[in-house]
Image: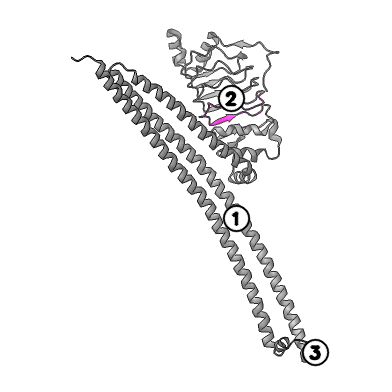
Amino acid sequence: MSLSYNSIEPNVIDDEMLQKAIEEQRPEDIVKLAESEGIDFRDVTELQLSFRNILQIDNLWQFESLTKLQLDNNVIEKIEALESLVHLVWLDLSFNNIEVIEGLDTLVKLQDLSLYNNRISKIEHMDTLQELQIFSIGKNNLTALEDVVYLRRFKKLRTLNLTGNPFCEEEQYVLFVVAHIPDLVYLDFKLVSDTTRELAVSKYQYLIDPLELEEAQALAQLEEKLAKQKELEYHKRLDEIHHATSYNIAESKRVEYNEDILQLSETLMTLEMQTVDQLEELIKDFEKNIAAIASTFMENVKGMMAQCRDLENRHHEKLLEISINTLEKSIKNELDEDLPDDIRGLLGDKTTLVNTVNTSHNVHLLKIDMRECDILSNTYRWQASVTGKAFQNEIDRNRSRVKEIFQYIDNLQEQLDNNLQEQLENIELLEPPE
C-alpha cells in the first residue's frame, strides 16, 4: 500500500542522499575512485532512491545522462522536477501517494513506466510518451473503463497492468481492454490469447470502427496543420532571400531552404504513409464486417431454401398420396361424374399419374435451387463490389494525395528558384562594377 507521511518523517532529495545512493549502487573499486575524485552526477545513468521516505521530487536536474530512475516506495504526492531527464527510458514511481499523472512531457524516450499502487483516478497527460512499451497502473482508483481508450495512442504499448483498479470488477473488462488496444501482448501479467482477441473484436467492433475513423481524420488534420506551418515558415524564408544584400547570403539561404523543402517533402510523405496504414487497417476491418454480413445473410438464405425444399417434399408426398387415392376411387367408379376430362385422363394410368406428379416436384425443386443460386451469386458479387470499391477508392485517394504533395513541393522549389534569381539580378544591379 501507499505510505502516509503522518506516521513517518519525510525526507528531501539533497546532495547527501544522492551521493549515498550512487555509492551504494557502485562497485567497491569505483566507490574508492569516486571518493578521491568526486562523483559527477552528469555521468550517472542509473539512480535508485527507493524506500527513502521522499515526499517531493527535487534536485535531479544535474543527472542529464540518466536512463533509469527508481523512486518507488516513498511518500511522493506529485510528479515534478523531471524535465531535464530527457534520456530517461525506465521510471518507477510505484507505491507512492500520487493522485494525478503529470510532469512527464519531456520524457519522450520513456519505454517503461510504473505508477502501480498510487491514488490516480484518470489516465491522462501522457501524449508525448510515444515510445512507451510497458505501462503499469494497477492498484489505483480507476473507475471508468473508457479511460483505457486513451492508451490507443501508444502504438508501441505491448505490456499493460491494470489489475486492482475498481473497473477490473466489470464483467467485460478484459474484452474491452483487448478490443481497444489490439496490439497488446500481455495484460495483467497474462498472455493475451488469440481466442480472447477474437472475442474482443467480435463484441466491440461497433465501438472500434468509429474510433479508427476518428483517429484517421485526426491524423489527416495534423498533416494539414503541419503543412500550413511549414508553408508559413517557407514564405518567411523567401522574404529573407528577397532581402539578402549579397550573393553569398542569398546562396547560403537557398541551400538552407532547399534542405527545408526536402524535409517538408519527407514529412508529408511520412504522414501520408501513416494515413495509408491506418486506412488500410480500417478497410480490412470493413472487409471483415462486410464478409460477416454476407455470410450471415447467405446462411439465412440457405436455411430458408432448405425449408422451402422440405415444404415441397411434404407437398409432393401429400399430392402423390391424394393422386393415388383418387386413382383408386376412379377405378372403383367412386368419383363425381362431373370431374373434368383432362383429370380423368391422368387418372386412367397410374404410371402416367406418378410420372406427372414427380415431374412437377422436380420442376419445383429446380426452381428453388436456381433461386438460391441467384441470390448467393448476387450476394457474392455485392460483397466483392463493395470491398473492391473501398480498396480502389483508397488507392485513388493515395495516388491523388501523393500527386498533390509532389506538385506542392515542385511549386515551392520553383518559387525558391525564381525568388533567388530575381534577388541575384537585383544584387548585380546594386553592386558597383569592379
Residue wearing tag 2: 125
Q: How is the image coloured?
A: one colour
| Residue type marked 1 | Ala
| Residue type marked 3 | Glu
Residue located farthest toward the bottom when viewing the structure as drawn: 332
Residue 429 x, y percent position in the rendering: 25, 18
Magenta includes 246? no
Residue 162 visible in image: no
Earlier residue among tags 2 and 1: 2
Marks 2/3: CA distance?
96 Å
Q: Residue at point 65% right, 45% down?
A: 203
Q: Residue at point 28% right, 20% down?
A: 426
410 relative to 285, above or below: above
Q: Nearer the viewer, residue 307 or 52?
A: 307
The residue range painted magenta reads: 120-139
Residue 245 visible in image: yes
Residue wearing tag 3: 337
Rendered-image quadrant of the N terminus: top right
Tell us which disc is closer to us: 1 or 3: 3
Please tell me whether mark 1 sits on a helix, a strand or a loop: helix
Q: Which mark is residue 294?
A: 1
